[in-house]
Image (tube, rainbow, N blue to C red):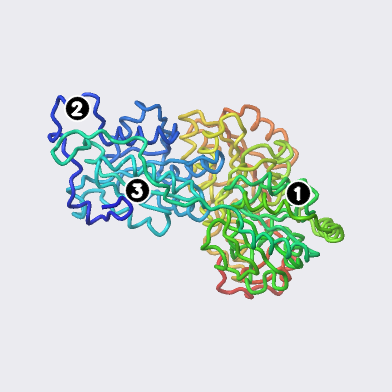
Amino acid sequence: MSIDNVTYQDIATISGGKLSDIKPEQRDGALRGAQILARSLQLEGVDVVFGYPGGANLEIFDVLREYGIRCVRVEHEQGAAHAAQGYARASGKVGVCLATSGPGATNLVTGIADANSDSTPIVAITGNVPTQLLGRNAFQEVDIVSIVKPITKRAYLVDRVARIPAAVRLAFTHAGGNRPGPVLIDIPKDIQQHYPRDPEGNYTEPRMPAVIETPEEPVGGMHEDQLQECQRLIGEAERPVLYVGGGIVSAGAEPELLAFAEHQGIPVTTTIMGLGAFPPGHELCLDVLGMHGARYANIAVNEADLVLALGVRFDDRVTGKVDEFIKHGKIIHIDIDRAELNKNKTVTLPICADIKAALAQLNSIEEADTKAWREYCAGLKQQYPYPVAETKGISPQRAIALLSEMTGGEAIVSLGVGQHQMWAMQHYRAARTRSFLSSSGFGTMGYGLPAAIGAKVAHPERQVIDIDGDGSLNMTVHELSTCRRYGIGVKIVVINNQWLGMVRQWQDMIYDGHRSNSDLSDPLSEVKAAGEEGVYPDFLAIARGYRVRAERVSSFEELKDAFGRLLADPDEPYLLDVVVEQEENVYPMIPAGATYRDIIMSDDDLKGTSGDSQGSNV
């Protein structure tokens, strides 16, 4: 029976070997399942896991310290998955999270789905009830492998102690290989407790590291005919654009991207997952495209006669009405995942290749003459800058731009999901790759704080800032306890507008201003205006409850000094509640299912749009 196809029903009839099967004299120096797991993780270079203990994984928690593996105990298993994601996104390594059976395992599901959507390499390890209880509806039993199969690259139920090393080796190989993603290993409690044995009941020394064939054939560069076709298309193009995403970051292809863009003189626009892959101040940088991306980026990509799409998946938040997206231009799509080619958008030349290798090949192509096109794109940037609100209170755009200026774009920032996420995408200028961590494809509120914890554990020497919204932070604010317990110096900047801001914006646009359940202000208070009296919940009081330093600002004049105090000690957790203009909207905005020609740049453009997008999803 292969570890790849063992089922819940199979293992319910199999015993991993009982302690009594091994003679006492054979146990000296022998390793139990939990120890084999810890040793296997150690051999993969794991020195930290994020988790929460429970009855079905205590054997694992008990032995981690023997193998020099630190466990950061979060306050909820969803936080463990997001912290593992933050660690992986910031470091480029595989993140590891650990949960118990039943609700512990199912609490990981949102984070696993998020990792799957954003191609983040994590390994989730869950305990389960003993094998003899599987399928019997035992206390805290769940078939987590079946639950997560649609949202993982692989999911394994370990049926024998001796198979633990191979399961771990396969998990890490798949998680980090080719297009990265999540893998789950489920280990029943008796498998953790027992020794591996041969058919006669003798102790069997496990093979560590496991010797297995590479489960994923590495994808190389382009074939010669593909390179020649690329050369022809690029040579014919007068208005080329590079549209790049998270695949560039996963491949570590940032140097090759910069070299190719400069060699050919091709403007570059990125997805939110691609932020940091190209220098934000570069003359060829067109920033982010898509629903809330730059107007100049959306115009350029749709007016281009050739788009080189690198490590992207033509997400609906980028394309809008997909049939109208790059309607008149040719498209070269290069991606390591063959399944993405021609999936959402039919292209001129689909190429399954390693992007780093492919870009190195493209750098051999003769330089093109793009001067007129570059000048046109530069003019678009001057003509259509991101809108910035001019208000009596704190403009959220100006607040984030000031934070970017004060950090020099050198901090790692993580985001919750909502308006603040889009403003950060527009105005925080990430100077380095792997420094802008956002739940992009899945849009998970509450991602920001636990992801920041993982990033800070990966890079304790760097400033790590969670730019969050009041609604999004509320979902995982309890992870302040994790910051305090382990001295993890995450900074939290709350862009506090007392609304589920993106929901409220869509309700105003699409549902005739019917703001159903999007108001976050005090339901029992008559005070609705932002300020010391009207801010609810009181994040300062919550932070004090977790013994984390916190303060609030409500005027822009106070903000620079407040940011200075926030950033003063990179090792101290600190929360700054920034009370911003309550009803500021995010612009630009291309309504769902519309095209770049339908872009909305201000509240004045909203007239006549109410009800036009009935049924659209936020």
Element on which disc 2 rests: loop
CA gap, disc 3 and disc 1:
48 Å
Residue 343: x and y in percent read 55, 68
- In the rendered structure, which amino acid carries the disc numbered 2? Arg
- In the rendered structure, which amino acid carries the disc numbered 1? Lys
Q: Nearer the viewer, mark 3 or mark 1?
A: 3
> Residue 392 — which label?
1
User: Does label 3 or label 1 sit earlier along the sequence?
Assistant: 3
Q: Nearer the viewer, mark 3 or mark 2?
A: 2
- In the rendered structure, which amino acid carries the disc numbered 3? Ala
Question: Which residue position holds label 2?
Answer: 27
Element on which disc 3 rests: helix
Q: Quadrant of residue 239?
A: bottom right
Q: Residues within 10 Å of mark 1 (few under 14, many from 20)?
A: few
User: Does label 3 or label 2 sit earlier along the sequence?
Assistant: 2
Residue 268: x and y in percent read 73, 54
Question: Which residue position holds label 3?
Answer: 105
**Nearer to us in this view, 262 or 91:** 262
Q: Quadrant of the C terminus?
A: bottom right
